Image (cartoon, grey):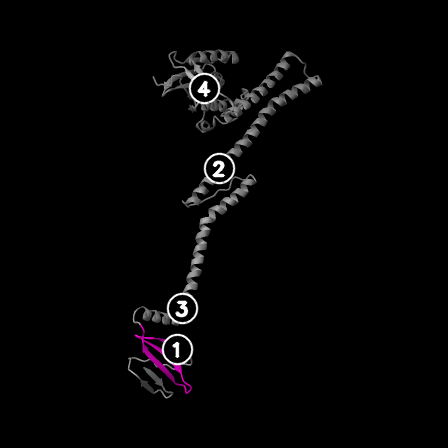
Amino acid sequence: MVVILHPDGSTETRGTDLGEVPRLRVEAPRWGVLGANVFATVPTADGGSVTALTPSPSRGFLGRLSATTGFLQSVWWQFLLVGVVAASVSLIVARLMARGMTQPLRDMAAAARRMETGDYSVRVHTRSRDEVGKLATAFDRMRGELENLEQSRRDLVANVSHELKTPITAIRAHLENLLDGVERPDPATLGVMLSQVERLGRLVDQLLDLSRLESGEVPLRIEQLPLHPLVADLISEIDVALPGRGVEVRNDVPFDLPALSADRERVHQVLFNLVDNAVRFTPHGGSVTVSARRQNGSVEVAVSDTGSGIPPEHLPRLFERFYRADQARGRGEGGTGIGLAIARSVVEAHGGQIKAESRPGQGSIFTFDLPAADGSDR
């Protein structure tokens, strides 16, 4: 079927009528689909047009394809605009999501740079619960541990310097007095100097012991150790070391208590530190008691006193190096502040735990547990 469109608007149809015909004035050839027919329109020299209309070769797939192609050609710029907008929105959303996911990583990098300079105050905050969030939480926990470690190191250096400076200053003063003739090298002066030297020696020995214990370099000579005779010998040593204190030290360890499976020298060191501290801080007329009992395959040892007690805020830090609940009295008694730290290291090396309980005005109780030789709870 051919339809001729004249310049005056009239039409001329030739061939079999195929239904609706597009009426087009075109300046260039054009084709398309109209219903079930395919048409092609060509302009004529006089301003009209000639349209050829023929049935579609297939009303199935090819017809739909031809129709779709024609539709896309007519609306291609709309699809292009929608695509550009969608791509822009996707890029913006992806950027925001990526920034939120990687923010903890940037925070950790910034914190690490500050930690390199010794600043451990920066914290990494995150609300994410994915792998990045878990990493940020672990990083912040590590930062806190490093901060505590650095503070402990500074405290240790400061405390050791102070403890070393005190006896060294005293010895130097006496030596200068001897050189200037202010003092005479009599037994009393030499005895004071000797006591300061012994204090220095004790401090150095305790520091070395603590360092070796914490690093695990001290081998434990495990043996079956009866506790009652060990405590009896210890009380005799305390009476000689601290005469005239007016403090009674009692041995309430049962004779039938199973022997310990422990290092004799190290257990003696723990007991001596605990009993020595208790005697020093118990007033005249008071008492210190060493007791023990079986408990779950181990032996729990307790050292209690009738002293003034320890304020609750000091209990969590009693076993730290150089920590003193009573700063002034501790230095006056000549303590170094390392004894309880050594006691904790020794007990933990045996697989036990040590703790302190106290109430102001009601005395203190230090307890620790060590494995029994038979390993049973009888």
Spot occupied by residue 252 in the image (x, y as percentages of width and height): 40, 13
Dot 2: what SS? helix
Q: Circle 3 sits in a helix, a strand or a loop, which is it?
A: helix
Residue at the extreme bottom: 8
In the picture of the structure, the residue carrying the numbered disc 3 is 78
Mark toward the viewer: 1 or 2: 1
Q: Which residue is mark 1?
A: 30
User: Between residues 303 and 280, which one lies in front from this camera angle?
Assistant: 303
Q: Amino acid at mark 4?
A: Gly
Q: CA distance from mark 4 to mark 2?
A: 37 Å
Depth check, mark 4 against mark 2: the one in front is: 2
Write the residue at 62% across / 17% down.
193
Dot 3 or dot 4: first in sequence order is: 3
User: 97 above or below 259?
Assistant: below
Q: Which residues are magenta?
A: 30-57
- Out of 3 and 145, give the one closest to the viewer: 3
Q: Quadrant of the C terminus?
A: top left
Which disc is residue 166 wearing? none
Q: Earlier in the sequence, mark 4 or mark 2?
A: 2
Task: Determine whether label 1 and label 4 are within 8 Å by CB.
Answer: no
Quadrant of residue 84 within the rendered picture: bottom left
Image point 47% across, 48% down: which residue? Answer: 103
Identify residue for label 2: 144
Quadrant position of residue 300: top left
Percent of width and height locating residue 6: 37, 87
**SS under mark 4:** loop
| Residue 204 x/y as whole percent | 57, 22
Dot 1, how many residues are within 10 Å of its Cα: few (below 14), some (14-19), or many (20+)?
Answer: few
- Is most of the magenta stretch helix, strand or loop? strand
Write down the residue under mark 4.
Answer: 307
